[in-house]
Image: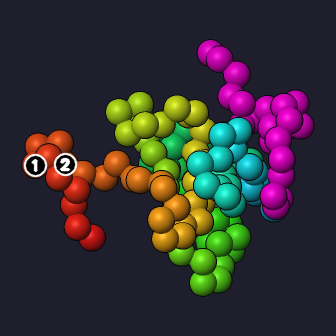
Amino acid sequence: MTPCVFCEIVAGQAPATVVQEWDDALAIVPLGPVVDGHTLVIPKQHVADFGENPEVSAATMRRAAELAAGEQPMNVITSRGREATQSVFHLHLHLLPRAENDGLALPWYSGRQGKRRQH
């Protein structure tokens, strides 16, 4: 089994820029932020994804909501499984502050219909 980089960060065995720390979670700057303010919120307990442990997932979302409080437009994104673009198999929530014309396109469209869904 390969080591989990987020578990190593939580244990202080790997470097990270910590934005905020709680008793149950960490907020860190990702290695390749896609917009200014891009932050990851990770639980200190190893949980592979949001479906593995609903209590840890809910607590991690609460921490993300605390960090994101305010009026800033923002996406909160998490993934489950390689097919859903998960690349680190430790639950993490991406907080993505948004601004008009920020250049960040989200790939939420149906390949079957060939066009973006309207929300």
Q: Residues within 10 Å of mark 2 (few under 14, many from 20)?
A: few
Residue 18 shown in magenta:
yes
Along the line of sight, which residue is nearer the eye, 84 or 96? 96
User: Could you tell me if the residues under marks 2 and 1 are in contact, i.e. CB atoms within 8 Å?
Assistant: yes
Furthest-top residue in view? 1
For the residues labelled 2 and 1, the Cα–Cα distance comes to 5 Å
**Count of marks placed on residues:** 2
Determine the residue positioned at 48% across, 56% down: 103
Q: What amino acid is labelled 1 in the image?
A: Gln
Residue at screen point 64% across, 65% down: 64
In this rendering, the answer to whether 32 lies above or below 41 is above
Question: Residue 31, image x and y in percent?
Answer: 71, 38
The answer to whether residue 56 shows anywhere in this view is no
- Give the numbered dot on residue 110: 2
User: Which residue is situated farthest in the left direction here?
Assistant: 113
Boundaries of the magenta span: 1-21
Residue at the image position 54 percent from the left and 70 percent from the top = 99
Answer with left or right where residue 114 lies relative to residue 119: left
Viewer-proximal residue, 85 or 9? 85
- Occupied quadrant, residue 80: top left
The kind of residue on which mark 2 rests is Ser
Q: Report x, y in % for residue 51.
A: 45, 48
Query: Residue 16, percent across and down?
Result: 82, 41
Question: Residue 3: within the magenta?
Answer: yes
Q: Which residue is mark 1?
A: 113
* Secondary structure state at the residue bearing disc 2: strand
Element under label 1?
Answer: loop
